[in-house]
Amino acid sequence: MRNRPPFEGTAFEGTAFGTAVLCLLTIILFPQFLWAQVTDDLKRGVVKITARGEGQQPKIGTGVVIRVDQDAAYVLTAAHVIEGDPKPTVTFFPNPQQPLMAQVVGIEGGDQNGLAALRVAGPIPDGVVALPLDLSTKVVGGEALTFIGFPRTLPPWTVSTGSLSGMNGPTLAFQALVEEGHSGGPLLLNGQVIGIVSDARGRHGYAVPASILAVALRGWGIDARPSEAMMPLEKVGPDGVSMVLIRSGRIPTKIVEVYGGGRVEEIQSPARFVYLANDLYVDATLVTNARYRRFVETTGVAPLAMLEGREDSLKPEEPVEEVSWYDAEAYCQWAHKRLPTEDEWEKAAHDTRGRILSEQVYEWTASTFQASRSRPTEPSDPTRKVIRGSLRALNIQEVIGDVDYQVRMYGSADEGTSGRGFRCVQDVAKGR
């Protein structure tokens, strides 16, 4: 018999509406990320750059669109692609017959790994998109990657593949057939830009990593802003777990009263909303026994009592239980993630139509419990943390109204009980 959380009378915000934004969750069964965009979608964020230095033959290189405004597009490339030409031309995939003149916004000249930023004034061809920078993925080597460019002997916007070798000093090293025309182009992992191609030596290429790209853009006063259509709906987190994109915005909520004995009742009230200011990724599954054991073995923290001596009886793929709030928080920090707030948890449950929820295990959130989310006050006990879950996981026996997975309760932060687990979230990294 599982221990259940205490039932407290409380007001909370929930929702009865579903959305089809993330229907792909029904097929999240694989350990590797599946990029859903077609190749042409990526090409719309890659440009051909032609530069003519004084007394030199024209040079062909590549660039990546990192922002599209109504009146201009911003392109990032390698400095040596345009060095010597203050007004290179840029050709966009949606309109390959119309090169447009660009203005150099910033350049790090004289360095093979230097970068340059261009501004192309409008009108920008319809269909141009800005690709997202990946500032969170930690590469280890062996990852499959994609890059797009303009090698001399192949058609324009050729899509090539390779594999990452890892970091080589301040640059990313990868194995692939790279030519001069690839210089300045995006190195893509899971549909996101992890670097800009800067050099090639035989079958080895080198790229400036996204973290350095972000620093350069910040210095030039450019805020990278990916097009909404190019945000991956799924990604693999630093701990190798599938994560799902949850978009910013608001969802309608309700007030629900929770009584002893597993009874909840919907309370009629004016419309209320939960609002998320920023996009984020949420784990598609609860943290499992196997993942938590890897955390224990890697960090040397004290293992949970329920894990000790029970290796044979616990199924690796099932959610870990009996974790305290502190245990959950420590794991998420180790995985370069964090616990979701209860608003984020509810938005994720709403946007996925509850598909990410377990019928057996309820979840810790980062939020300290308050009796009313609509009229928040100073929490009476900072060790009381909000727990959320499906009605079945929370052992709800009687439901009056349409409350679905929306009940909220609390648990003591230092207590782990059977049926209590967690998942992590990760903020969508911005270019600034």
Image: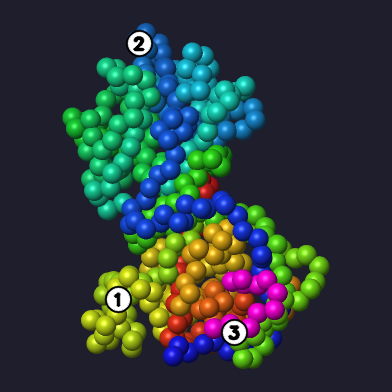
Q: Which residue is mark 1?
A: 315
Q: Is residue 404 magenta?
A: yes
Rounded to the nearest angstrom, the CA distance separating label 1 from label 3 is 28 Å
Q: Contact (CB < 8 A) between labels 3 and 2?
A: no
The numbered mark, 3 or 2, whose residue comes first in the sequence reads 2
Give the answer, above or below, for where 430 lies relative to 343.
Answer: above
Q: Is residue 145 magenta?
A: no
Q: Contact (CB < 8 A) between labels 1 and 3?
A: no
Q: Main secondary structure of the magenta part?
A: loop
Q: Residues within 10 Å of mark 2 (few under 14, many from 20)?
A: few
Q: Position of residue 200 (x, y in %)?
A: 25, 31
The numbered mark, 1 or 2, whose residue comes first in the sequence reads 2
Which amino acid type is shown beneath numbered disc 1?
Lys
Give the answer, above or below, for where 89 lies relative to 160.
Answer: above
The numbered mark, 1 or 3, whose residue comes first in the sequence reads 1
Q: Nearer the viewer, mark 1 or mark 2?
A: 1
Give the answer, above or below, for where 64 lies relative to 10.
Answer: above
Which amino acid type is shown beneath numbered disc 2?
Gln
Residue pushed farthest left? 202
- Res. 56 mark: 2
Give left or right: position of 265 versus 343: right
> Is any part of residue 39 visible from this angle?
yes
Q: Which residue is mark 3?
A: 397
Q: Residues within 10 Å of mark 1 (few under 14, many from 20)?
A: few
Count of marks overlaid on the render: 3
Which amino acid type is shown beneath numbered disc 3?
Gln
User: For numbered disc 2, what is the local secondary structure?
Assistant: loop
The residue depicted at 26 percent of the width and 75 percent of the height is 297
Query: Which span of residues is magenta-colored?
Result: 395-406
The residue depicted at 46 percent of the width and 33 percent of the height is 41
The residue depicted at 42 percent of the width and 65 percent of the height is 285
Residue pushed farthest right? 270
